[in-house]
Amino acid sequence: MKIKGLILLLTSLLVFLTGCDNSTTPKTQKALHQVIKLENVAWMREKLPADTFAYARVPTIWQLLFEAKADGLHPAQKLEAHQNIINNIKKGLIDSYVNKLPKEAQFPFELLLKNMSSPLEIAVLNASDGSMVPNVMIATTLENTSKTQISELLGLLEKQSNKQFRVTKAFNDSNFATLYVAMAPVFMSFDEKTGRLLMLSGLSASQKQLQSLLARSNHATELNDIFAFEDSVDVSGNNLETWINIDAIYQKNKAMIPASEQPMVEKLGLDKMKFLWVGTAASAGKSELIVKLAMPEVGARQFIAGVDSEFEVQTAGTPRSAWQITRPTVEQVKNAYEFALTFASQTEAEKVRSKTDEVLKLLADYFGIKLADMLAIYGQKIIVVTDDSGTWFASKIKDKEANKALLEILKEKFKMTIQQKTLAGVSIDVMEASTNEMTEKLIKNLGLNNPSFKNPFWDMKQRSYFQIKDDKYIQAFIPQVLADRDNSNNKQSLSDWLSNQQGQNWNSSLLAYTTEVRDAPRSIYYFYLKMLEVIGNLTHSEVDLFTMPTAQQLDLPKKGQFSFALDADNEGFSVKFSYEYSVFENMSYVDGYVALVYVGVIAAYAIPAYRDYTLRSKVTGKMMSFAAEKILISQYFKENGLFPNQEFISSNFHSNDEYDYDQKTGKLTIYFSASDDAALQYDSIVFVPEVDEDDNSIYWQCYSSVKTSQMPDDCYPLEE
């Protein structure tokens, strides 16, 4: 059954690999995706030197979700009224929740939440002395912030770091400071006027290197390809992204690759890779999730061959969805096949080549034409479109005479019949063949086993409906679709629709899909407004939706689009998922208001739960801080048969911890103070020893007065 299905599918593809009608001019429509110019707020990118190995950009939650960045909500988010709402939410979040954080976290949280105005940028740079340990550069922008506040923040970190963080040189008049983090030097620059904060850390880092980086006005020309790609997909700098400079890493480390492995690296084409880029993007009114590998079509890249074909079709009215499937060319298949054989031994390669040649010769002898020549008759691309007429398929005929000859061969070999019929004044070809007869004859002539295919389900006539016009081939499951498509007086160019209405370019797409969703921009916008109102309620801030315009006033498009594309060209390949705004839009189509309730419920539980988690961690830490002392008491009891005296305890316990010790029972009581956490003040932990009389060993039972939700699993409530 599987063999028959595969053969039927293969035969159908051989017959129906062609394309469509160009006879009419599309109506002019308003483009949904206009180019929006914005200033890129990420600034450290312009300071990067040629030997930058990697870069990451992490926007704030405000930038990622609430700032205008050329996506579907740009028209609304750029409004002053919207910015006022976001400012109110920021203030409400600070006023409502900052005081619920631990005291040591309140100032840093408020400072970053209010004043951080550009993404956090992180770059990994080659060591300045050529060593193997790279340096790291970190940058952001803190508006309305003074060096005094930064110094205060550093002081808090130093106090809480248990000597892992220390400031060695405070800010001087040139805005530089020096600190150490886990024994690594960190050189810092902060400009109060611009709010730009830049840090450089690493064993080979220096203030001189930091000054040199600050003095740069443009990134190194060696990074032009990376930034050209980034600028083409993201004009705002407010999206999440990371990239790896594969070429720079390879050039730095290729001397360390064993000579025996270098030929394999070059054979795979790994030495030709340029960069890997992963991130979200926003441009021309849409958002995207993108993975891009810049690598020419060499080595392993031959298995993802580029597209070497253009194909234009006309649709009946505005399409609702479209697919594109692109097969490799014969030459690309040959190159990949020969490349794969180079990994086998000479004997194995000869066996594979011999078997492949044998099968290809059988097919050629049977059909009277080589498979390669057969595939060369048709273009690479198969288009599947759903429009006003229904769903139909199209591809291009590159050689009309060869196509006619192939049809005659198929008619003779499989006893197919092709006749022309008319429906609604449209001529449509109908091909008819017996499935069993086709399959059995092909299997027999290929010299394969000849199993019986007398299943009644397969013993039937198969019909296909198609049209051949000029160099175009159109197929549908039923003839009515072809008739309605041919009679349509509203023909449109598919490529124009993809470019202008969908913001897509499928010239280099191996596999692509796009669909329109009616009212998507409006639904997403209205869901977004409701989300702002809910967040406003959670933060006790004023969100007046009457200050925001309607979808009609914003002139939002009537339809939205969701797309996928796997692209390949001579520079590399990429995977792109396109959508209107963000992950929130998914909730707006599955009962968005119910989702909002879930958000509220989750928030109601998550905030207290996180607080319980942090307190439970502190309780656990307090318990662990006395682990050594409990061991000392246990060992003393095992050796002496009684608990140690107070003098022994005083000489071995932490002098700065508040505790009580009962010499008679061995009970140890530990007290929390405000320095641990204000919420734990006046609580305590009690360790009660239980003696195993068989070997005089001690097992400790734990009891505590803290809330059950904040208590570790191996501790029990303390009875009053």
Image: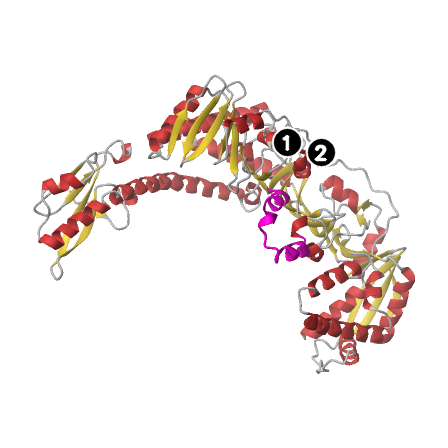
Residue under the image location 18 percent in, 48 percent down: 632
- Determine the main secondary structure of the stretch shown in magenta: helix
**Residue 11: within the magenta?**
no
Left or right: 410 in relation to 174: right
At horizontal 83% and vertical 59% (from top left) the residue drawn is 378
- Disc 2 vs disc 1: Cβ atoms closer than 8 Å? no
Q: Secondary structure at mark 1?
A: loop
| Residue 438 horizontal/vertical position (percent) | 78, 75
Q: Find the residue positioned furthest to the top.
A: 173
- Tell me where the magenta segment starts and ends, as one range: 244-269
- Above-or-below relation of 538 to 409: above
Callout 2 secondary element: loop
Identity, as a three-letter code, of the amino acid under mark 1: His
167 and 544: which is toward the camera:
167
Q: Which residue is mark 2?
A: 34
Residue 541 visible in the picture:
no
Residue shown at 26%/51% (left/top)? 714
Front residue of this view, candidates 251 and 142: 251
Give the vertical position of 399 relative to 241 (above or below): below
